[in-house]
Amino acid sequence: MAFSLSEMVAGASKAASEVGSIFKNPAQAGTNSISSTQLGIDYLMAQVIIADPTYVPPTYPNPDPVGPPFISLSQHITGSVASITSAIYEKTLNVAQDLKIALIASDHQQAAKAIDAITSKNLAAMPNQIAVKFPDVTATQNTVMDTAFTPLTGAAPHMDAAAATMAAEFNNIGFMVPFFTAMNAIPGVIQMTTGEALLKYIGNTTDKTLIDAAFISCSTSLDFIIGLKTAFSNTGTHTTTMATGFSTIVDGAKAAMATATSIIGGNQLVSMLSSPNPFVKSVLGNVIDTSTIDLGAIDLKNAVESNKISLPAGEALVLSAKGSTADAETVSDKMVPAVNIVAPVNASYVPYTIAEINEFSRLTTVQLGRAVVAHQAAAEWAQTNLEDWKVSTGYRATKVRAGWTEQAPFGTTTDPVILEEWRILLTECRRRFAEYKAGPGEARTIAYTKHDEMSNEWAARSKYGKYPYTYQESIGTPLNPSDKTTHLDTTK
């Protein structure tokens, strides 16, 4: 069932496992496969312990400081899957904010390449501005963005591979052949050839009488028992590899986001090199090697207008739509002034420091937390005061008896007793719903609306500086009054 817009906004703050969430766990299939494998392994290990009471199952360091220092293989698998799911959930909650950072950083990179192409008179190096805004569906994505979101885009193959590797330890080869033969001889069993199918069948079969018999028939084989012990140890190794491998993916994503943030910060610093503020000039004069600075590239518009830079191919560049999903007939023949490709750095552009941008990010995240709390409070109120109340009063049954329709909400039955009973319940329900809308429902809406506004404002101030709205309007970007929020800074 499709959600309404308000439901989608609310669902964007819920984990994939929660009711009403718009998210899914990208690694759910792999997680399910590992869970099936785990159930079968638990059974086989219990049987090995019965067959060999001297057997000491493998143990692993417990990452949780609260609890025993070592945990079992089953706990190791469960904990590793949980840590991956937790990392995916954390990344999912921040995906909107992280995507904005990555996109802004990508914009800065493309803008820098465009200016470099203009100042060096190298049109071949000019990024296709149409393709930048409308990338071809087959185009390779920005490397920083790919790496930054691998915990989401790469979670499925990572978990699928781990599940397959674990199950392969129990495939129908070597020491496992006798057990497969015995299992496949059970009446009604579909012939199994893979460890995944075997473990899934064992784990999902409630009555294990026949499975027990099949195991006992093989348990006298020393090779079979030794082989299982080795498979258990190997499974533990695969589990560790799965967990550490995903940690590496997460670390890479964090590093990529740090790179994206540094690109934004670098752009802001370079933009300040043309600042007329004497204090800024004084500070930067002491730390910047001026021999490395090309002021023409920093302030392209003024450099062109003062003839310090002569544009290649005259005053305009023809932008090709090659590789773009845009309409080639309407855009490829447009002559676009080169100075308009990159927004000019003018007096209204005053960049923020990295510390200030990070503080905006923190404040936006705090507001999201408040919105989540407000949502939970609203949901609890509605459950107790509306849904539970409806159950306790027989609301729905009375509604049916009264013959409710959208055109006749107070009922269509001719029984006056039922009509009166329904009128009382409907009136009370409307009162309660009005109370919800004016109270917890309104608080929830306000909290989420403020978060959305703060998120958009954060993006605007990161990209356009301390006067983002004045700056955008100065370069011809139309804005609505509702766009000009000042939750993070009162300057406009």
Image (tube, rainbow, N blue to C red):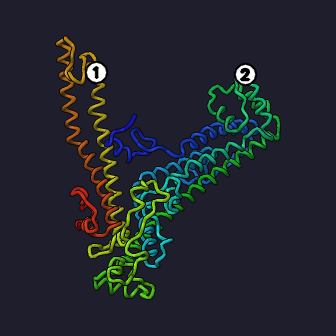
Q: Earlier in the sequence, mark 2 or mark 1?
A: 2
Residue at (50, 45) in percent of width and height:
25
* Disc 2 target residue: 187
277 left or right of 291 in image = left
**Quarter location, residue 167:** top right
Of helix, strand and loop, which one carries label 2? loop
Which label is found at residue 189?
Answer: none
* Disc 1 target residue: 394
Q: Residues within 10 Å of mark 2 (few under 14, many from 20)?
A: few
| Front in this rendered view, residue 137 or 422 | 137
Residue at (42, 55) in percent of width and height:
329
Judge whether 172 appears above or below 288 on screen: above
Is residue 185 visible in this depiction of the protein? Answer: yes
Q: Position of residue 321 (x, y in %)?
A: 45, 59
Of helix, strand and loop, which one carries label 1? loop
Three-letter amino acid code at the position of disc 2: Pro
Determine contact: label 2, label 1, CB under 8 Å.
no
Q: Position of residue 133 (x, y in %)?
A: 42, 59
Q: Position of residue 67 (x, y in %)?
A: 54, 50
Judge whether 299 appears above or below 46 on screen: below
450 left or right of 177 in image = left
